[in-house]
């Protein structure tokens, strides 16, 4: 994409609004953790290094007010109340802590800082916010360039982390995994830990490229989410910071989705009560307003799309430009565009899960047809 197009293009505001809510919630959790950390800093037994001369110190009496302001700013940011003010305030509070403590290892706070800045600049309060609902500040479209910068930030984070681990002998040989992870005894073998370490390094370096490519994006999101959740579960130290990092990272994947408003077509059997229940929930969860649902009875619209009435009645049909899928694959593609479910939608394409899903879909479809024939016989 040409640089001029990055600045001129506009996209759906929904993903930025959703990410803002998650980042705000993560900031609230980090605010409580910061309260505890800064209280520990000020204990007489704590050894302090040389601080930056232009950064003012904070007193023990000021920590509760500082932490409370952080938490309130995070709450305001999450709810979308005066986001243009709460965003910069939250950014300043996080930046102050990083500068005061000089915690160069605190990756989750760096991520929180940068996401807060880009979400504020990107006017993320235009969607899923009280500002949009109560003050008429909502916008359907936002400039693309802040979203593009978030994509670049997430990509660089993975590549840098992968390279840093590759340059660490203790990580490559599996020592770090042995010391930090809660693993079954069977994994406590040098060659297994070495292989796992190399797999993590290769995965983190390759991951951003898979995210940018539409063909591999869904599976990349699923495996990335699984990786971060497992990290939270298997590392017994630093649990809350890992949760904050997991939330900020995995939900940032939402900006990689291709979710332009009314850009996907879903054709379905509107004579089926069971199908209507599923479509009802799809519509309720379609917060990004991506899908256009067309019933099988709308023969004229289906004809224009190249979908026969019989195809729509036999299985749900999903169309995204030239891409078309049906049945369980169509369900997977729909879920891949919805909030929350986009994180694990591609699990439906895994070999074992795919077979079970396909069988379940066919059994439900067969039962639906049998019931319909029974009703016809009674009439």
Image (cartoon, helix red, strand yellow):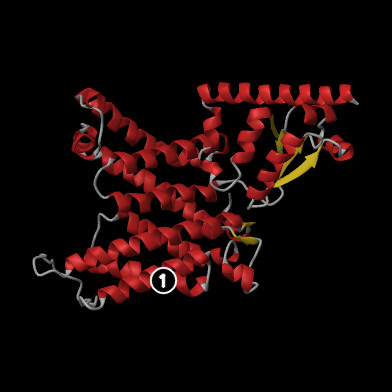
Give the image location of residue 121, x and y in percent: 50, 67
Q: Please name whichever residue, 254 or 373, is drawn nearer the observer in this view of the structure.
A: 373
Does residue 183 appear to the left or right of 205 in the view shown? left
The quarter of the displayed image where residue 57 is located: bottom left
Tell me the quadrant of the picture where the C terminus can be found: top right
Query: Do we see residue 291 in this rendering?
Result: yes
Does residue 205 appear to the left or right of 283 in the view shown? left
- Neighbourhood count class around disc 1 (C-alpha, 10 Å): few under 14, some 14–19, many 20 upward: some
Q: Residue at x 36, y 38 (%)?
A: 230
Q: Secondary structure at mark 1?
A: helix
Q: Please name whichever residue, 43 or 6, is drawn nearer the observer in this view of the structure.
A: 43
Give the image location of residue 366, x and y in percent: 72, 21
Q: Residue at label 1?
A: 72
Q: Residue at x 52, y 60 (%)?
A: 146
Give the image location of residue 229, x and y in percent: 38, 41
Q: Residue at x 89, y 39 (%)?
A: 300
Give the image location of residue 136, x and y in percent: 65, 72
Residue furthest right in the image: 379
Does residue 353 appear to the left or right of 25 in the view shown? right
Q: Please name whichever residue, 234 or 120, is drawn nearer the observer in this view of the structure.
A: 234
């Amino acid at each position: 994409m040409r640089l001029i197009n990055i600045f001129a293009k506009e996209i759906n505001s929904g993903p930025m609004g959703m990410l803002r809510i998650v980042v705000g919630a993560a900031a609230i959790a980090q605010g409580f953790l910061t309260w505890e950390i800064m209280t520990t800093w000020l204990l007489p037994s704590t050894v302090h290094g040389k601080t930056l001369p232009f950064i003012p110190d904070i007193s023990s009496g000021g920590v509760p007010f500082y932490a409370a302001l952080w938490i309130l700013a995070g709450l305001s940011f999450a709810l979308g109340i005066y986001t243009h003010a709460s965003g910069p305030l939250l950014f300043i509070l996080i930046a102050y802590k990083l500068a005061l403590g000089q915690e160069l290892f605190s990756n989750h706070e760096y991520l929180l800082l940068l996401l807060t800045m880009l979400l504020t600049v990107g006017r993320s309060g235009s969607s899923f916010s009280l500002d949009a609902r109560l003050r008429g500040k909502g916008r359907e479209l936002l400039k693309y360039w802040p979203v593009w910068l978030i994509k670049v930030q997430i990509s660089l984070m993975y590549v840098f982390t992968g390279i840093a681990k590759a340059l660490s002998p203790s990580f490559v040989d599996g020592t770090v995994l042995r010391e930090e992870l809660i693993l079954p005894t069977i994994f406590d073998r040098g060659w297994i830990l070495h292989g796992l370490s190399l797999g993590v390094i290769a995965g983190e370096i390759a991951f951003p490229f898979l995210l940018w490519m539409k063909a591999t994006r869904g599976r990349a999101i699923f495996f990335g989410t699984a990786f971060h959740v497992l990290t939270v579960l298997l590392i017994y130290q630093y649990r809350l910071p890992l949760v904050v990092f997991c939330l900020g990272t995995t939900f940032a994947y939402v900006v990689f989705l291709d979710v332009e408003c009314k850009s996907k077509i879903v054709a379905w059997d509107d004579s089926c009560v069971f199908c209507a229940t599923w479509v009802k929930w799809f519509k309720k969860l379609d917060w990004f307003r991506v899908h256009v649902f067309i019933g099988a009875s709308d023969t004229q619209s289906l004809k224009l799309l190249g979908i026969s009435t019989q195809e729509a009645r036999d299985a749900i049909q999903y169309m995204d430009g030239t891409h078309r899928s049906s049945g369980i694959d169509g369900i997977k593609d729909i879920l891949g565009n919805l909030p929350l479910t986009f994180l694990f939608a591609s699990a439906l394409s895994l070999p074992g899960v795919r077979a079970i899903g396909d069988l379940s879909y066919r059994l439900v479809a067969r039962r639906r047809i049998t019931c319909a024939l029974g009703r016809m016989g009674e009439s």
